[in-house]
Amino acid sequence: MNCGEFERVLPEFLEGSHTPEQQSHFESCSACANLLADLELISSEARLLLASDEPRPAVWDALESRLRDEGLIRLPQFVTSKESVSRRWRAAWLVPVAAALAIVAGVKLFHPAGAGDPAPIAKQHVSNPTVAAVKPVSHEDQVLLNTVAARVPAQRARYRADLDSANSFIQDAEQSIKDDPNDIYTQQMLINAYAQKQMLYDLAVDRSEQ
Amino acid sequence: MTGARRAQGDKLTEAEAIERAKQGDGEAFKALYDLHKRRVYSLCLRMTGNTASAEDLTQEAFLQLFRKISTFRGESAFSTWLHRMAVNVVLMQLRKKGLPIVPLDDALEGDEEGQVKKEPGAPDERLAGSIDRLHLQRAVDELPPGYRTIFVLHDVEGYEHNEIADLVGCSIGNSKSQLHKARIKLRELLRMNRAEKAGKR
């Protein structure tokens, strides 16, 4: 057996399958022995490359943003009274609630009143005394409510409840920022809350113009 | 990897993080990302040889994972599930770019590409007892894409030839053949690198 023939059977030889003739060539040929040793070394050292590099922090930032955009990240609905609640944690609930607000508002507004049965949701909000009955209405919000005044009662109640919720988010976030002006996370939450409120206005106007 | 693997320091096991991620917990997503980011990113980097592409693909692999995490039932290891998904994301990207997943060199069988090159009178030295990681990394980056794919999947990631054949759509024999040629090519690149270094001294 010559070196060329041995090289052709090297893959099998490396896997442990070989004939006496191949073994004899391997033992007598230093070039082929060196080649085999190098290939085994390369193969074993390759594991050094496993998990050897780390992505930049920006990769997670971009991923997190997409997860939020797709609604995959949701935060817990409530925190028990026994848990200590950090300022950051208090602000964090703005994200899912604001997102839910936008989704619910969108679904309700873009579906005709006769489609499905809006009554259960409407009842929940109309019967919530902490929302509609107590909170004062700013001039801007009154404009929005006037815009939807001609809608069916369930939709009007929905708008009112969502508007009050958005205002609550904003109020809470603004208070958190007063406590800690450098809290970038809460600043982002405030921006998101304003964006959700803007979306409510846009939906009301768009729907009125149709 | 076991379900008891710790995520977020001592706060959360991997199994707990998976369950919380299914509920949409952002901290659990981050914990899972932190546990696996190096392996996934390194895989993407090795297979593309490009940091920008590797970052995009890492993001895409995790995004796909988190979209489907509610379907994870734990029949296989989470890491196995994730890494296979990452491999598929990379392979799909390579296909989109028109890069060869499997070298189109069956016609080169018997060609010098896969053979040991010997020059009469040239010293036939072995590589030293170990290979510097950076040199190996650079040599892998220089491999033609098709060779690189097979080499990374087999020798770095530890996939078997039958799994590689399934992933990339080639025969088991082809996978073995390409792996051998990739190792031969790497040896050549590493020896060239060593010769260049010796020449500078």
Image (spheres, grey):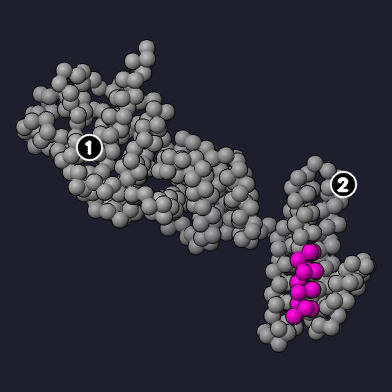
Pick the residue in front: A18 or A69.
A69
Q: Where A203 sits versus A95, above or below?
A: below
- Residue placed furthest toward the top: B201
Mark sitting on residue B87: none
Mark sitting on residue B113: 1
Quadrant assignment, res A57 = top right
Subunit of label 1:
B
Q: Position of residue A69 (x, y in %)?
A: 64, 59
- Residue type at the position of mark 2: Lys
- Residue type at the position of mark 1: Glu
Span highlighted in magenta in the image: A197-210
Pick the residue in front: A156 or B116.
B116
As helix, strand or loop, the secondary structure at mark 1 comes to helix
Subunit of label 2:
A
> In which quadrant of the rendered image does the C terminus of chain B lie?
top left
Apparent side of residue B1 relative to residue B169 in the rendered image (left or right): right
Apparent side of residue B83 relative to residue B189 in the rendered image (left or right): right
Apparent side of residue A74 relative to residue A37 in the rendered image (left or right): right
